Image (spheres, helix red, strand yellow):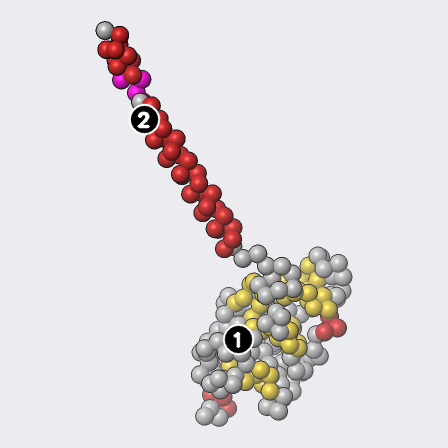
Amino acid sequence: MASQAASVSEAGSGMSRREFLYYIWGASIALLTLQSVGLLVWFLIPRFREGEFGGQFFVPIDSLPGVNEAPANFPDGRFWLVNLNTEEPNELMYPAPGDNLPIIGVASIYKVCTHLGCIYSWTPTNSRFECPCHGSKYRLDGRRIESPAPRTLDRFKVLAMAEDKTTVLGESTLTDDFWNPLELPEGTAFIGIDTGDRKLGPSQVLLCDFTNSCP
């Protein structure tokens, strides 16, 4: 009679000792899995520091090239800095058909060719960027001169920073999801380059098409 009462009591409790242990075991496994996934995600999330690619760079205003002069090279950040003004044209930077507005200001250009990802360079003798892999050529602002590059060179966001490197005096604006050059306001001491904020260059008409000089 006593054993029957115990069986009835255990059945009425709704959970046996074995079931309880199963629940504890399952919860422990789930918690361990969540912890492992959390650590993996934390490991995989990029954490970029100032001064390394993917983070922010601060360039003193004195390092900026002159207007329409050869670009300044910043290999650690994988970008060029250019200082543009098509209202003061020369052989490096000049207005072209399709430039609907004057191009004025500072731009930061990604150092990777838009064709197949080669590292291009500035060629002083020809006053343009040239890719050694397949011959793509670009104007000082990164616009395509000759193919096979499918589009203009990509750009990073530019900020005008005060002496304290925290006060933002101005920042790049977007047109068709592409960074415009930034006209630096008075008081700019540093140029901030956000290499984590890259926009793809547009597919503009080749400049050699306008001059009927494409190979």
Q: CA distance from mark 2 to mark 1?
A: 62 Å
Q: Which residue is nearer to you in this view: 58 or 49?
A: 49
Badge 1 density bin: few <14, some 14–19, many ≥20, Cα 10 Å: some
Q: Which mark is residue 138?
A: none
**Secondary structure under the numbered disc 1 in the rendered image:** loop
Q: Label 1, on which residue? A: 112
65 on left or right of 32: right
Image: magenta residue range: 11-15
Residue 140 is drawn in which quadrant? bottom right
Residue 50 is drawn in which quadrant? bottom right
Q: Is residue 48 above or below residue 82?
A: above
* Residue located at (62% from left, 59% from top): 49
Q: Where does residue 195 sit, x and y in percent of width and height?
A: 58, 65
Q: Label 2, on which residue? A: 18
Res 94 seen here: no
Q: Where does residue 157 sit, x and y in percent of width and height?
A: 59, 65
Q: Which residue is nearer to you in this view: 34 or 110?
A: 34
